Amino acid sequence: MISERKPRTRPVLFQALFLLPLVVGCIAAAGLPQPRSLVVRSGARLTADHARMTVIDEWVRAEVINIVEDPSFFISTPRVRDPVYPWEGFTISGDTATVSVQGSAPDARTHHEIYAHLHMMKKMDRLEEWLPEAVGMEGYQLERAILVRVSDAWLYGRTIFDLAPYAPLDELIFANEHGYLDAFILTARADEFRAERRAWLDENPDATEEYRAWFREIFERDPKGLR
């Protein structure tokens, strides 16, 4: 039974969320610490607003608890050797969602689980509980809304809990925060969202090269889909 499978190792961020206040007592009294600036190798920097992180903190905690405790579904996180984006190899079969996680990047596990959880909630017709603004969305728009949530959760983890860098999710948050999320998705997943990519390029024929130049400036390499 699913209820018998549910107890398992908790996501890394879940442990951090609930153990950190015990270690640093002042956090429990004063709320979240001020977010740290996030800097990548090129020197590109992101800053996060404390009020925004406080809102994210509330839904991340609730969602992680649901992932761990809800017996109506199961999320499997097989380990892989190389960096992996949340959607790569993602599947849902019955009551089980499978989402790969790089074995040497445990901090990314919770965020890949959030991605899988939101897709499972869509399948179970429970998306209103966790992502109400995406109710009724399908296809690309749904995927985009889910990746915005994953991006917010990773920005929160990186700036509040100083989680280790992880290239696929760092790329996601920089793209989201700088207005390149559509470019990020439609370049990395061109074959999956062909109609949306055509519309994007029809609107701005230079969008691909603009995105490539921005990505190279931030990450000093070409983006997925153009490598």
Image: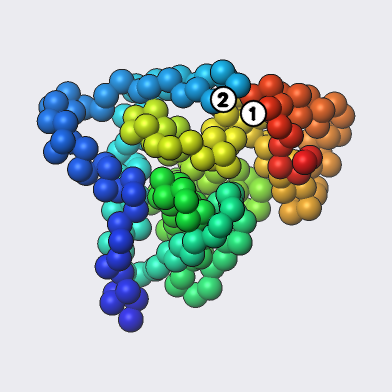
User: Is residue 208 among what the camera can see?
Assistant: yes
Q: Quadrant of residue 16?
A: top left
Residue at (30, 65) in percent of width and height: 8
Residue 41 has which mark? 2
> Could you say where residue 131 lies in the image, as x and y percent from the top left?
45, 46
The tag earlier along the polypeptide, 2 or 1, is 2
Left or right of 80 in this view: 62? left
Q: Neighbour class for label 2 at 10 Å: few (<14), some, many (≥20)?
A: few
Q: Nearer the viewer, residue 208 or 80?
A: 80
**Residue 85: percent from left, percent from top:** 59, 49
Q: Which corner quadrant of the image does residue 159 belong to?
A: top left
**Colour theme:** rainbow
Relative side of 29 to 113, left or right: left
Location of the C terminus (image quadrant): top right
Could you give the CA–CA distance between mark 2 and mark 1, rounded to whole angstroms? 7 Å
Q: Are marks 2 and 1 in contact (CB under 8 Å)?
A: yes
Q: Which residue does the image show at 54% across and 68% down from the upper left? A: 92
Q: Is residue 207 visible?
A: no
Amino acid type, callout 2 = Arg
Say above or below: 113 vs 202: below
Q: Amino acid at mark 1?
A: Phe
Q: Judging from the image, what secondary structure is the residue with disc 2 in?
A: loop
Q: Which mark is residue 219?
A: 1
Residue 34 appears at what percent x and percent y?
31, 20
